[in-house]
Structures are given as C-alpha cells and as structure tokens.
Amino acid sequence: MRTLDRIMIWGAHPDDEIIMGGTIAAQADAGCEVVVVTISRGDAGYCRPAWAQTIADQRREEAAACDRILGISERVFLGWPDQGVRHDWELTRRLIEQLRRHRPQALFTLGPHDRNRDHSAVHEMTDEIVWQAGENILADYGEPYSVPLVFIYHGHEGMGPSIEVDVTPWAARKAEAWLSQTTQVEMLPRIRERMAALARTQQEGGTDTERFVIYPRVVFSDFPALPEGADA
C-alpha cells in the first residue's frame, strides 16, 4: 500500500472511520499522520433510556479507544447533533477551516448511496468545501488549500473508478476498534460475531479488503502504476 504523510477522514458519527480502519492502521504504522473529523456527537446512538444524557460522553471515550487502537493522530469533534448534519454555511466553514489547518494530502469522505441522512449530507457538501477551501475567500479560516486527492470510503455502491486495497494484516485491529465501541455493539449485537470472524481472517488464510472510489474532480497527472502481479 502506498503511504502518505497526512490524511484526513470525515465521519458523520464517532465510529464511521472504522469502515476504513485497516487502511488507517496501515497508514499510521507507516508514519502517516491521520486526522479524523467527527461532525456529530453521535448522541442518537443509544439503546438504553438511561444513556440519553450520557451517550455523547460515552461515545467520546469510545472514540479515544479507537484512536489508540488504529493509531489516529488527532480527532476533531465539531459537536453537531446526531441526525442533524446538514449542508449549511456554518458547517461548510468549519470543514474548510479543518482542511486549511491540517492540509492533508488526501481526504476520505462519505458517499451518496446511504439511507443515513447524516452520511449523505457529508457527501453533498464535499464538492463545495473542497473547492472553496482552495479559493482566496474566508481569510479568517486559514490560508487557501486545495487537497490533491479525494476518495469516497463508504456509500459508493455502483460507483467507480475505484481502488481496492488489501488490509488483511490489519484486520484484527479493525475488529478490535469496532468492538471498542461498546454502546454500538450493544445496540447492534451481531457486530460481535462479525468481528470475531474478521479478527481470524489472517490466521485462517482469508483476505480483508477496503474499496475507495476516486472522487470525480480528482485529476491525475500520469497513468497509475500497474496493479501488483500484472503482466509487464
């Protein structure tokens, strides 16, 4: 896997980034700085009434556990309400600010094919934010910056072109990261069985891959390298 110096992942909720957890762990192990921007508090993700007032804090603690497991360098919480992520001027400016502050080589965002409205809202605003972050506007939100690479890591069914990376050596850590989200595992108990199988992937001779769709406005200056194992 080709590694970068700094990447940024946008998630609507604490835990969205674990979808690409193998890639995060691989990049972090290679010395890449990984920044996750978590837009909402995740405060709708509870299955016990008693958690209603504490869930946001619980999910922050779970996010910190995920950061340690995967090697995430920094996580920025923007504090939007769960089920309340929308393409508006305030959130647009906050995300422009994060791009300009961290200046990642690659941005990973969510795709349009998702019934979770928070996820699709992140996709809807990506194009405008990536464009405006590079324009000479909003001077108090940082120096203009155009992120060179943008990928969609989830909600991209039927879209292409795409990149599929083998993350088998990091499958067990991705499983551990999912299981660290204890409130979500209780809400969706089938995760336990799925993650137990994922954790055994490498030792059982299986393969775990993650697929990324190249964002439509990304322009390459040359043909990409041939896939590994391709005939010369």
Image (cartoon, grey):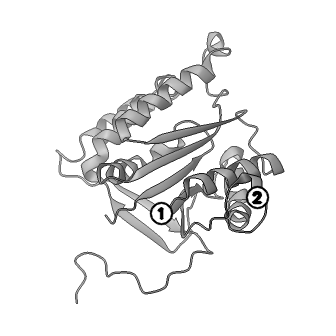
Residue 96, image x, y percentages: 69, 55
Give the vertical position of 232 relative to 214 (above or below): below
Q: Residues within 10 Å of mark 1 (few under 14, many from 20)?
A: many
Q: Where is mark 1, residue-wise?
A: 212
Point 73% across, 57% down: residue: 125
The mark lying in front, picked from 1 and 2, is: 2
Real-space Cα distance between discs 1 and 2?
32 Å
For this view, does 130 lie left or right of residue 72? right
| Mark 2: secondary structure | helix
Instruction: Decide which of 157, 124 is in the foreground and name it.
Output: 124
Farthest residue to the bottom: give it: 232
Q: Where is mark 2, residue-wise?
A: 139
At label 2, which amino acid type do we have?
Ala
Farthest residue to the top: give it: 50
At label 1, which amino acid type do we have?
Phe
Residue 189, image x, y percentages: 46, 27
